[in-house]
Amino acid sequence: MSQGRRPINWLRWNLWGRYVCILLIVSTTMTNVLQAKEKKGTRRLFDLKSDASAQTQESFKPIPLPLPTPSEEEAAGEIPVENAGHSEISAEETPLRGPLLVGGIPPKWTVVEQKPQPEELRISQRPPETGFFPESEFAPPPLLEGPGGEIIYQDNFPSDPNMAVPMFQSVIGGEDFSGFPVYPEPAYPEDVFVEQISCEKIRPCCDPCSPWFKIFQPFCSEPQPEGGIGEERVMFAPFLIETPVPQNYTGFRFDFASGLETPDRSELFWAKKGVGPPLNENNVNYQDVTLALASGGKYFSTTTKVPIRFINPDINDSTVGLGDLSIATRLLIIDGDHWKLTQYFNTILPTGSKRRGLGTGHTSLEPGFLAQLKWTDKTYFFGDLRYQFPIGGDTIHSGQRLMYGLGMSTVQYQTDIFAVMPTFELIGWSALDGAKTLPNGLVIDVDSETAAVLSTGVRFVLGPAGDLGLFEAGINSAVSLNDRALYQTLTTIDFRFVY
């Protein structure tokens, strides 16, 4: 006879169920108590944080906190001074303020003077120093913010060196790894407060908010021993010698010459008597205002010069008008790291009035070669050799001319957007043939008369480049070493927009 299934004892299962429930309740209660003790500071912190966030925008009540003990140098009054910054810190700007950037320039702090700390300049209010372990040595000290926005810990606090810090935490606020809210705050040594000085008190022209900043910005930059803008433009610095490297620019040049004694010599300045001005001349002062347009590529360029000439003779009438237009080409045939050689060809067209003495009345061609030697990144040497001959001039008066010159330019001072480049040039030319008229009316031959001119100048580069390009300005003074040049003194003021 088979034995039946044993009936379930429900009373026994009910007892076991009660024991299990009691154990679960006891263990859960003990766990909660332990967690409450460990996280007591954290719960208090979150409550304070919610209350503080609601009251921060309505009212701000700074309270004094213990500050770092001054070092021996500070106690002795020897406080290190750094460069001045660009703006002031006021009491209204102190709360919840991050690093200040003016015109892309990071702030630099300076201790202006030692005086009592103003009551309104205090470290901003923060929650009490309670954390996960309020009575432990691991409780973090108050957090401060340095001049560059970095978080400064007054004491060493154990942390994971590989822990990532949230981006912009010091600016917008947040929580660090200790659970404390971090807000940007200035650090003030005891009895001394750190102030940022506006550059209006030091150099008003360098204040980015000043209307003069755009003009004087190049003079506010730090000098660079190498790699500045001067090294990019020093090879174009000479005034009288033609440079071999093609470039693109628009220029305005002002020449003030004096002391030209025989203006019709070889018909280099104006035509002979009768074709040119009607009277014999013994001295001419003149001024040229020239518009120059240069355009091309790396190896070839064309330069067009359109002069407006003002002449002031001693005997003939003074006049003004368009002078002889010139068109010059450059073809770079040797492009080495140190040496460059260019084929040069200039055509002078008779666009000026020969009767009034504004032009020669004939076309002239001027082929030649231009050379350049790179001595260093900052120093260049130049040389040119050109030959000018007339086409259609007077068979007796007009003549040929051989021109030559040596020059040097260097970078004296440079930054990223400003440079000073002195120049030194020695040029000469020889009239190979032709004739000239003396003040008494006697016409004599020109027998290889040679002129020598010494020139010194300085060119400035003013950046950064604008819509019209990079701006350059220069001034040059030349003096004739004898009385056979086309002037005794020459002063040149040159402006260029390089693009």
Image (cartoon, rainbow, N blue to C red):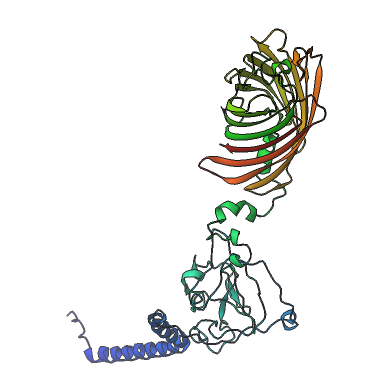
Quadrant of the image containing the C terminus: top right
Which is more toward the observer, 468 or 358? 358
Say if 447 sits above or below 235 in the image.
above
Q: In x, y percent, where is residue 105? A: 57, 60
Q: Residue furthest toward the top?
A: 395
Which is more toward the observer, 256 or 417? 256
Q: Could you tell me which residue is drawn at 39 percent across and 81 percent down?
A: 58
Quadrant of the image containing the N terminus: bottom left
Which is more toward the observer, 275 or 8? 275
Residue 227 appears in the rendering: no
Say if 233 sits above or below 175 in the image.
above
Say if 110 sits above or below 142 in the image.
above
State which quadrant residue 488 falls in.
Answer: top right
Q: In x, y percent, where is residue 240? A: 71, 30
Q: In x, y percent, where is residue 480? A: 79, 30
State which quadrant residue 86 falls in.
Answer: bottom right
Q: Could you tell me which residue is drawn at 73 percent across and 14 percent down?
A: 400
Which is more toward the observer, 161 or 83? 83
How many numbered marks does the figure carry? 0
Residue 72 appears in the rendering: yes
Q: In x, y percent, where is residue 212? A: 56, 56
Say if 318 sits above or below 4 in the image.
above
Q: Could you tell me which residue is drawn at 58 percent across and 33 percent down?
A: 249
